[in-house]
Amino acid sequence: MIEFDSVDEKARGALFDRRTLLRFAAGAAAIAPLARAGQVRAAEALGVSDLPGGLTLISGAGTNVVCAASPEGAVMVDGGLAARADEVVAQALARTKAKKVATLFNTCWRLEQTGANDKLGAAGARIVSHENTKLWMGTEIDARWENKVYPPRAPIARPTKTFYTVDTLADGPEKIETGYLLQAHTDGDIYVFFRKANVVVAGSAVAGRGWPVIDTATGGFLGGHVRGLETLIKLADDKTVIVPADGPLLTKVDLEKQRAMYVSIMGKLQTCMESGFGIAQVLQSAPAADYVAERGDPTQFLTLAFRSFWGHARQFKAI
């Protein structure tokens, strides 16, 4: 059984100490990055389909985008890549019969999720995110694991409303709840729960297909990924529709299976860490071998997941 101590995520002073440590850890030899799924599929035609409660799913823009109608205008969760922003917004307005997008939720800072921010921010939309996401978007991000430096986003593209733990937006008959998913894919991941429709948009904190990206440059941590899944499992019931950043729609049972898989892998990675293994030895030990047929090549995932432990060694009681 893996045991690690909880961390007070609301301690803002500790946030900056953690970022310093993570940047140092990320300074090791860069990973030969695999192409991001959203970037590979950026040129495909958009798919538009119905979700429960009158919501709409727009796929093919780099991430799954969910939109809903409200008295103020359209509500969007994530916006896809910037190159697809015009198309995505046009579809959202057509489907919701709205004249404008009133609210845009960012489930994290990554460009696959926030490409529409510039367009919608300039149009006056309220942009909602976790506080950490806003902070990351206001600074340069040295993502050495993918050999890339992300410049600060334009002020107009940054979130205008943030929260730390949970928040609620009452927008007409639908109650929209948002909550923090700890340090999962990044340290600013959130879910957006359309309570009446019983639809949860989980962003990149949940992998619909393949392996998740544990973005060590901005606080991603495999332990946080597991805790994020636990949060979603508690939130969902047997009829809840979970929308990941890419891939098919999921159920609570799917999340439970994913959690069991990551806990198993995490235990093996912890053993590797306690044995003093390097990345090459970790990969040779094949801790994800049981899941390769289902998920594909785990090299990038295992490398990032193992490195994500470096900033959290003291949380493991066996160390």
Image: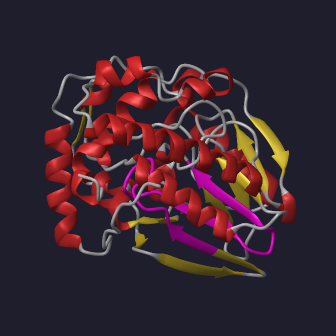
- Using the image, determine if residue 34 lies above or below residue 63: above
Q: Nearer the viewer, residue 212 or 190?
A: 212
Residue 112 picture location, percent across and down = 50, 39
Q: How many marks?
A: 0
Image position of 164 (left or right of 63) = left
Residue at point 73% right, 33% down?
46
Q: Nearer the viewer, residue 188 or 284?
A: 284
Please, which colouring scheme is shown? secondary structure
- Using the image, determine if residue 154 lies above or below residue 61: below
Residue 19 appears in view: yes
What are the residue bounds of the magenta stretch?
Answer: 177-203
Residue at point 53% right, 70% down?
179
Residue 200 picture location, percent across and down = 69, 61
Residue 315 picture location, percent across and down = 28, 59
State yes or no: residue 32 in magenta.
no
Residue at point 73% right, 48% down?
254
- Using the image, determine if residue 86 lies above or below residue 76: above
Q: Nearer the viewer, residue 153 or 24?
A: 24
Residue 185 picture location, percent across and down = 44, 47
Residue at point 75% right, 39% down?
248
Residue 101 appears in view: no
Image position of 24 (left or right of 125) = left
Image position of 302 (left or right of 237) = left
Q: Nearer the viewer, residue 293 or 108?
A: 293
State yes or no: residue 195 in magenta.
yes
